[in-house]
Amino acid sequence: MTQSPTAARRRWRIGIDVGGTFTDLVAVPGDGTSWSLADAVTHKVPSTPHDPSQGVETGLAQLLERGIAVEDVAAVAHGTTIGLNAILQGRVARAALVVSAGHRDVLQIARARMPRSFDLHATPERPIVPREHVLEVAHRFAPDGTSVSPGRASPGVGEAELARLVERLTAVAPEVVAVSLVGGYAAREAEQHLADRLAAALGVPVTSAAAVWPEAGEYERTTLALLDAQITPLMTGYFTALRERLRRLRVDARVYITTSNGGSVSIESAMRRPVQTVLSGPAGGVSAAATAWPGTDMVTVDMGGTSSDIGVLRGGRPVLTTTATVGPHPLMTPVVEVSAIGAGGGSVIGADRSGAQPVLRVGPASTGAVPGPAAYGAGGTRPALTDAYVHAGVIDPRTFLGGTFPLRADLATAALAQVADDLAQEDGSPSSWAPAATGAGPAALAARADGVADAALRVASVGMAARLRTVLAAHGEVPERYTFVAFGGAGGTHAALLADEVGVRRVLVPAAAGTFCALGAAIAPIRRDVARTVRTVVAEQNLDALTTSAAELEREVLDWLRTQDVAATGTVTLSADLRYTGQPTTLEVLLAERPAEPGTDGPGPLRLETEPVLRRFAEQHERVHGFVDPTATVRAETLRASVSVRLGEVRSGHGGAAFVKTGARDVRYDGTPRPASVHALAEDGEAAVTGPAVIEKADTTVLVPAGWTATTDDGGNLHLVRDAVEITNEEG
């Protein structure tokens, strides 16, 4: 039987998530084999954009001062968007690219598509590196991995050609180099050997595309390798600085970095392949939801300071994609599918006068951590959604972040009123967005701010709803069958409004809603994904070859797992991308799930069978496309393997609470002021709260609109449910 944390030495897993506005930290206690979410300690500090590691050190030092001994820290897991921001802002290392002869324009040609098919003025995206930095070598590989060197008797790159290539690269003076040869995915060792020779000659990091991700798709594989190479110096510097700051705090614990697939890897693995971390921040909350509520169909809504990130979990498992993008660049590795919309607590509310009539916009620009929304009182004059919440009475400026960060309601009102003035017609008459009240008195300012706040909340809800419907429709799903998991600083504040917009009936606000992505980092499983292109027919005569390839992938992830110093049992998942012959797209189909036991050579021989594979493909094809073709040939394009290990049992604990009324105030969220009760969480009190109501927590404020009821569970999570009467009326 597992010991409780109180019966043994208490250990802590600390998760850190660096956002655009705040750096979030969560410490989860346990005994090394199980971890209690309800007893987690949370903390937030302002982010330090000039050096994110400074905010991490400051926040971690303050967290440790809350009764956590450094010798009791078992692990530190860190999610970061530093690599992502560097790519989007172009703050990356100067790179050169080595390709096979005749393929110098691989980046310009890309997929031979314009950004917007029907825009006659559209221009191609700027290549990730200029053409003059792309150099050719007379070497390539056949699909079976055979070395091909046109015009030469012996395959490979000779010393003379290597010397010429090095000379040309030296003239370019790159800080990093990527090598991506045709067919390199089938000859990883050979391509890596060339990369090693270049690195030795040039004295700069050289990345092999096949080592980063060995899958067919020349443009995508090349781009991924370049992204990895370009952020390597930056990420290596950041991770080195992070280690030094942890040493200054005397934290001598295992350090993990969260990855885009919802898992985490050792900091050493992250330094070797930093591109796997670029979308790790948004993936953290999805991973936390999967761990906390397995088996549930969920849509995660992470509404932070800059944007709202929407993720989907089917049956409690995050939906992964290999078609994500970073800006205009494809990211072909498996990542948690998260869609972002520029609607967060810091999203700017402003007037857009570019059309015939002035209109109100929310985002995508953000006030950021500095100066922040007008209500922060830090010099910001542009209103944000947070200002709308404050003016509408949803957020009490005195109790924001548990009273540690008081706000200025008067500044919020004045900033919103200025937007109303900006929206006025050129002749001075009010627009449909701005009320007719004029003047500088408090009543006139409040009236103008009312109209802007009402409109801003509505615009934000509609924009998020449109994105959500699009995401679910792509998977053949409808919102009504899902539960919202709302987190981030503004997730609980806006979740019920969004749910009303799309017809969702259940909203779950985690106990650590304001720091949920950091919690996801703390409890994220160790995970690794690999792939291999096979391109063969799924038939009995090919099954031995498919089985052998799948077994080799399984061995690869198990060998990697041994480098992560993990003692827990995990799971190896094998899948294949299948399609009918002639189809342009594939479906990922599960082949097998097998245990990954530490200290063993694996779960025994693997054997795939044709009939179960074809049956699963048919079932999935029917669900996604609405038909099956029993006479058509099924082809396997890519085999995939992943290993996932959870570092102990995650328990909800006994942190449940009831509601205690602390006051009342008017709130407006649908254009009409409504009297609402205000509640806090306590050990004793009411079991449920009906809307209109506001629940104030240290890390977030939760709005319970009319027609909704809120309850809490043993883990301190809030459950919002639309009342049955409300649902019955809607359904008629």
Image (cartoon, rainbow, N blue to C red):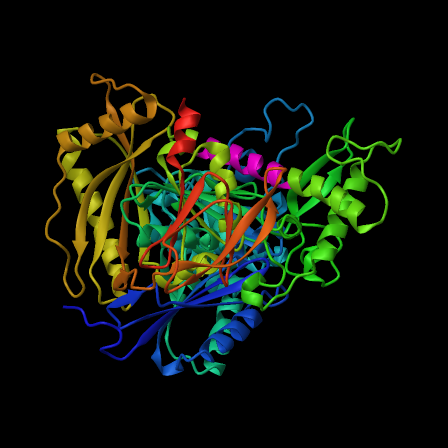
Does residue 136 appear in the picture of this structure? no
State how many labels appear.
Answer: 0
Task: Left or right? Give the position of 550 relative to 199.
Answer: left
Specify the farthest residue to the right. Answer: 427
Whether residue 464 is in magenta: the answer is yes
Q: Residue at x 84, y 41 (%)?
A: 438
Q: Residue at position x 76%, y 36% from top? A: 434
Residue 442 vs 588, above or below: the answer is below
Of 250 and 267, nearer the camera is: 250
> At 56% across and 44% down in the image, what residue appears?
327
Residue at 46% across, 38% down: 707
Q: Residue 254: in sight, yes or no?
A: yes
> In the rendered image, which quarter contains the C terminus?
top left
Q: Quadrant of residue 400?
A: bottom right
- Of residue 550 and residue 446, the one placed in the foreground of this image is 446
Q: Is 4 on the left-hand or right-hand side of 434? A: left
Give the image location of residue 299, x and y in percent. 40, 42
Q: Position of residue 332 (x, y in %)?
A: 42, 43
Where does the N terminus fall, quadrant-wise? bottom left
Question: Magenta includes 601?
Answer: no
Residues drawn in magenta: 456-471
Tell me where residue 265 sits by quadrant: bottom left
Q: Nearer the viewer, residue 717 or 642?
A: 717
The secondary structure that dominates the magenta segment is: helix
Percent from the top left, x then y, of residue 64? Answer: 45, 78
